[in-house]
Amino acid sequence: MTDHFPAEAVLFDSDGVLVDSKEAGERAWVTWSRRYGVDPDVVLTGLHGRRSRETVALYVAPELAEAATAVIDGLELDSADETRGLPGAAALVASIPDARRAVVTSAPRALGVARLGAAGVPVPGVLVTSEAVERGKPAPDPYLAAAVALGLPIERCLVFEDSEHGIGAARAAGAGVVIGVGASALGLGCDAVVPDLAAARWVGDGIEISRRLSG
C-alpha cells in the first residue's frame, strides 16, 4: 500500500536525510571541543540540525566565536570526503526537475556542496546554506528562503527532515507536508516517517511513499 502527498516542490535537509556525515562530523566536533576545553559529550548533545556558529556560541566567549566557528567549519570540510549517500537519496533527488527541488542545510556552502558531491547526490540549483539566512533552524528562515528561490508558496512544498531542529523549522515555515526520515523523526509531529528515501518517489505532482516507520 502506498500513500500520496501532493506537492509542487520538494525541499530536502542534507545531513541525515541525503547524506551520512555523522561519524566524521562528530569526530570533528570532538576535536574542536578538546581544543576549546569543552566536554565533547555535552557539545554533541543537540548538535544535529543546527548551524555551527550557533553551537559554537553556546561554549565560547563572544569575542572568540568567529575564529572558533572557522575552526570547526575547517575541521568538518577536511573530512567531507568521508560522506556517504543514504539509501535512495541520489535517485530521488535526480528524479525531480531542478525547478522543483532544493536542499536546505545548516552547513556552510562549501561543506554542503562537498558532502553532496562525495555522496553522489546532485547539487540542485537552489541550495540554501548557513550563510544565506539571518537565522538558522529551528527558525523558519531557511525553508522560507528555499520556497522564495523556487518561486512557490511554502504551503505547496514538501519537506524531508530528520532532526527536531529541522522539523521545527519546516513546521514554523508552514510547509504543506513534512515527512520525517529515520527513527530520529518519530514522535516529532511529521505527517509520515520513512526509514529512508528508498521508500519515496517523485510522481510529478508530489511524493509517493511505500513504507512507513511507526512508534
Image (tube, rainbow, N blue to C red):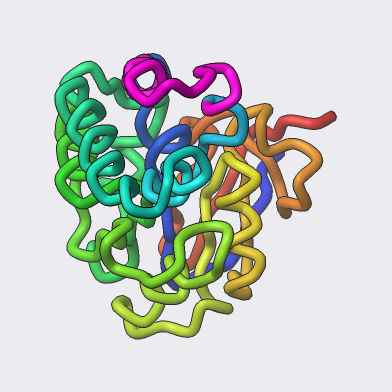
Residue 181 image offset from top left, x and y in percent:
58, 37
Quadrant of residue 84 within the rendered picture: top left
Q: Residue at x 31, y 46 (%)?
A: 64
The answer to which of 59 and 19 lies nearer the viewer is: 59
Q: Quadrant of the C terminus?
A: top right
The answer to which of 27 and 62 lies nearer the viewer is: 62
Q: Is residue 70 left or right of residue 151?
A: left
Q: Residue at x 35, y 31 (%)?
A: 19
Does residue 130 lie above or below 22 as drawn? below
Residue 75 image offset from top left, x and y in percent:
22, 26
The answer to which of 57 and 157 lies nearer the viewer is: 57
Q: Residue at x 80, y 40 (%)?
A: 187
Residue 97 can be seen, yes or no = no
Q: Is residue 135 left or right of residue 84?
A: right
Q: Is residue 169 left or right of residue 26?
A: right
Residue 168 image offset from top left, x and y in percent:
65, 57
Point out the residue furthest to the right here. Answer: 215
Question: Is residue 173 located in the magenta-colored stretch of the structure?
Answer: no
Does residue 94 lie above or below 195 as drawn? below
Q: Residue at x 38, y 49 (%)?
A: 53
Please give the range of residues in magenta: 26-43
Question: Is residue 30 located in the magenta-colored stretch of the structure?
Answer: yes
Residue 212 can be seen, yes or no = yes
Residue 123 image offset from top left, x and y in percent:
19, 49
Q: Quadrant of the N terminus?
A: top right
The answer to which of 195 and 49 lies nearer the viewer is: 49
What's the magenta bit mostly, secondary-structure-wise?
A: helix
